[in-house]
Image (cartoon, rainbow, N blue to C red):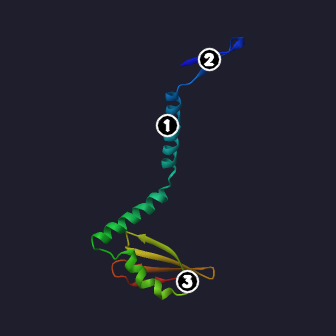
Amino acid sequence: MKSLHLPYGKDIRAKSMMEKTGLLAFVGLLCLSLSVMAASPADAQRRGAGDDARQQMLDGRVKSLKEIEASVLPRMRGMKYIGPEYDSRTRIYRLKFIRENRVVFVDVDARTGKVIRQQ
């Protein structure tokens, strides 16, 4: 480490570029690890459900979300489509819509594509 000598007996130690870079890398890794640890279990569950749906679709056990949406969306004219949820245990898609401040759920059997319930 280099020292700069100033009048009146004070030293200022200049940190090398290597030390500064190391400190920045450490702080960056610390922030990254904290953000990963802060991810909620609900986020992991959502990602898991999407992965399950994809695998079940690739295996031919369920219809794809695009197929489900293609059959349901035209029936829901006048409603705004919010998005889907998927339950891999029951193999049911839940499509969410909104109209005039009212949320409507449409449950669809992912194996057959048939609407099970609309509420």
Three-letter amino acid code at disc 3?
Met
Residue 26 shown left or right of residue 68 in the figure: right
Q: CA distance from mark 1 to mark 3?
A: 49 Å
Q: Earlier in the sequence, mark 2 or mark 1?
A: 2
Q: CA distance from mark 2 to mark 1?
A: 26 Å
Circle 2: is it few (<14), some (14-19), or many (20+) Cα within 10 Å? Answer: few
Q: Earlier in the sequence, mark 3 or mark 2?
A: 2
Residue highlighted by disc 2: 4
**Residue 46 location, x and y as percent?**
45, 63
Quarter of the rendering containing residue 4:
top right
- Above or below residue 41? Residue 9 is above
Q: Residue at x 72, y 12 (%)?
A: 8
In the rendering, which numbered label is found on residue 25? 1
Quarter of the rendering containing residue 44:
bottom left
Three-letter amino acid code at disc 2?
Leu
Residue highlighted by disc 3: 79
Three-letter amino acid code at disc 1?
Ala
> Callout 1: helix, strand or loop?
helix
Circle 3: is it few (<14), some (14-19), or many (20+) Cα within 10 Å? Answer: some
Residue furthest to the top in view is 9
Q: Quick one: 79 or 85, which is closer to the camera?
A: 79
Q: Residue at x 49, y 32 (%)?
A: 22
User: Which of the two discs, 1 and 3, sits closer to the camera?
Assistant: 1
**Residue 51 location, x and y as percent?**
37, 63
Q: CA distance from mark 3 to mark 2?
A: 71 Å
Q: Residue at x 49, y 73 (%)?
A: 83
Q: Contact (CB < 8 A) between labels 1 and 3?
A: no
Residue 70 shown left or right of residue 58 in the figure: right
Residue furthest to the left in view is 59
Q: Residue at x 68, y 15 (%)?
A: 6
Q: Quick one: 20 or 117, which is closer to the camera?
A: 20
